Image (cartoon, helix red, strand yellow):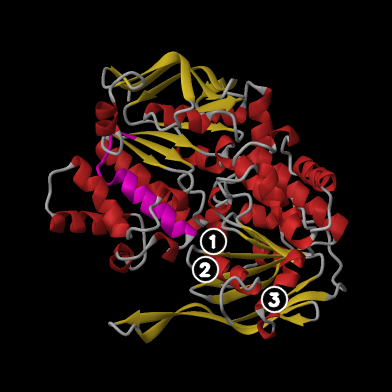
Amino acid sequence: MNETILTIQNLSVSFKMGTRITKAVEKVDLVLKKGETLALVGESGSGKTVTAMSILRLLPQSAIYPSGTIEFGQKNCLTISDEEIRKIRGNKVGIIFQQPMTSLNPLHRIGKQLKESIFLHQHTSNSAADERALLWLKRVGLKNPLNKLSSFPHQLSGGERQRVMIAMALINEPDILIADEPTTALDVTVQAQILDLIRDLQDEMGMAILFITHDLTIVRRIADRVTVMKDGRIVETDLPETLFNAPAHTYTRLLIDSEPKGGPDPANEEDAILVKVEHLKVWFPIQKGILRKTVNHVKAVDDISFTIKKGHTLGIVGESGSGKSTTGFAILKLNNSQGEIILGDNNLNDMDKNQIRQLRKRMQIIFQDPFGSLNPRMSVSQIIGEGLNVHYPGLTPDQEENEIITVMEKVGLDPETRQRYPNEFSGGQHQRIAIARALILKPEFMVLDEPTSSLDRSVQFQVLELLKKLQKEFRLTYIFISHDLKVVKSLCHDIVVMKDGVIVEAGDSDKIFSHPEHDYTRQLIATAFQDQPS
């Protein structure tokens, strides 16, 4: 592990927009050794991803490099030709991107996208490429991998798409793997499997890993060394044991102290029921033949029932593909369903589209993939204010702008950045923009689909505190969909555990975490808290 495979020296990266130059990374020095895992941690916007993307020159054309070198294979990646850097991308250096949905081509099937990388770097037959693609889908733990080869990205869950990205990054067995939040969308059991897989492959191939994450639990489990970044600079590098037990920098201590803890604010058990779901079913038809005859159904959600009291938070947990997000979408009438969905006095499945549209301001959603849900052609101000234009058309431009500024401040965004576009923000900032867009309509019910999954721990802590504060102030009712059981424990009053489209356990949060009854629930909890420091 002493042999150096990648050296970054005095790297500075800025972005030029017209006459404005924004510094993103300043004088960064990094050394990655063969076979080691270097974890790169820090807040959203600290420069982690910009540093990593610079290795393969994947930043937009607005990026400039005032200083520095990136040496790999005795070549400077910043100055070699486009042809030479293309030979390295996906072959010598693989990468797992943070947002799988926006990284996969929505028009091509999964198999074609996997084989594209194989054909680009290897001389092989189509049948051999098919076999290799199938093998890697199996290795990253996808169910029914043969069917997934012929699927489009939108037909997979968030976790399944992330696993496809991992397979794509590793399919050519690279010397270096850049893993940018590679387990963000995965439930804890599959996350553990993926981390074990990456470790096994690393041992087998001597692969070096640059592991970007906000999850300090993962850092404890996988890293050989840890580098902490803040405001584009490195503030600390050390062994995990030293860093966690005796952090030298105050910012590192802040990150460690921001781990989710405690529980939700007390709620009144006498509160009225706001949301009632009875015998909910979401079945997707399986069609075959020229006439597209329905031969069977995928039972994504199969006859589930629950209630949520006003001002309470219901957590829905389970593996990727268990039906969590589908349940949330069905309740908001974003997909077709059978059964009763009652919001207040309204049975949503008895209402037409115009009636549902009038209710939209009362119920909002924060999607799992924040960047994919933001229109790249609209400024942040336009994105956040779009709902006001639909539901409150009588507002003056000044009133609308004041509402936008207020909600941006509430979610920790600088209002001065409101005229910028989504591509100018970090992953965590994308999520805060999505939260602001939902909050601006002052809804009474919100579906939070992994709302903190892409946030580093310190910002995640702030967002969770914000959600609690807003819930208390406005008596908001939440459905919180998540694979992160530590976050669920800190926010949710009640929990529903789903597996294969059905509820296997439900009840009070404290009771489920202290005395889980179902084997699957016990497995989830044991995996989530196995690395909890004593």
Is 398 left or right of 137, judged from the image as shown?
A: right
Question: Disc 3 and disc 1: Cα gap in Å?
Answer: 41 Å
Residue 328 occupies quadrant: bottom right
Left/right of residue 334 with respect to residue 313 in the rendered view: left
Above or below, 438 against 342 in this view is above
Q: CA distance from mark 2 to mark 1?
A: 6 Å
Residue beneath label 3, please? Answer: 354
Locate residue 176: give its quadrant.
top left
Residue ID for mark 2: 520
Element type where label 1 sits in the image: helix
Q: Position of residue 388 (x, y in %)?
A: 76, 56
Quadrant for the N terminus in the image = top left
Q: Magenta segment, which residues?
A: 158-176
Report the mark closest to the observer, 3 or 2. Answer: 3
Indicate whether residue 290 is drawn in magenta: no
Based on the displayed image, in which of its 4 quarters is residue 533 positioned?
A: top right
Front-lying residue, 422 or 463? 422
